Amino acid sequence: MAEKWKDALTDKLCEAFLVLETTDEMYNFLEDVATIGEVKALAQRLEVARLLSESKTYPQIAHQTGASTATISRVKKFLDYGANGYKIVLERMKD
């Protein structure tokens, strides 16, 4: 599935994320490249993934994040069967 959306443009987007060095630089880039709603949705999904990895229940996660059960289920699916992106990020953020 992932190969369908990978191309030269998405390669450049990934490279753009990797060249940023500070949180402020990332905020500036995100503000220019995405809507506030899109950024907040991504942040919410990451928090949902973190809470799922801590074995929190769907109701606990929904209450804490405001995420719908559909969003929580989608994140759970990617945690269990995805490309391990969430797992890599969550593990590295622990350090």
Image: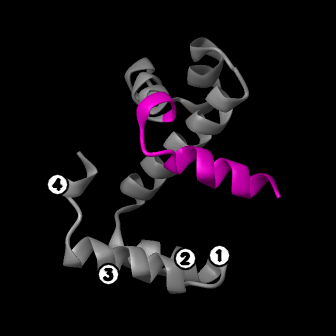
What residue appears at the point 69 percent right and 20 percent down from the top-left corner?
56
The residue that disc 1 covers is 23
The residue that disc 2 covers is 26
Of the residues tagged 1 and 3, which is closer to the observer? 3
Q: Does residue 82 lie above or below 91 as drawn?
A: above
Q: Does residue 66 lie above or below 27 as drawn?
A: above
Real-space Cα distance between discs 2 and 1? 5 Å
Secondary structure predominantly adopted by residues drawn in magenta: helix
Quadrant of the frame with the N terminus? top left
Q: Are marks 2 and 1 in contact (CB under 8 Å)?
A: yes
**Total numbered badges shown on the rendered structure:** 4
The residue that disc 4 covers is 4
Quadrant of the frame with the C terminus? bottom right
Q: Is residue 72 magenta?
A: no
Real-space Cα distance between discs 3 and 2? 15 Å
What residue appears at the point 50 percent right and 50 percent down from the top-left corner?
85
Q: Are marks 2 and 4 in contact (CB under 8 Å)?
A: no
Q: Residue furthest right?
A: 95
**Residue type pointed to by label 3:** Lys
Under circle 4, the secondary element is helix
The residue that disc 3 covers is 12
Q: Quadrant of residue 39?
A: bottom left
Q: Are marks 4 and 1 in contact (CB under 8 Å)?
A: no
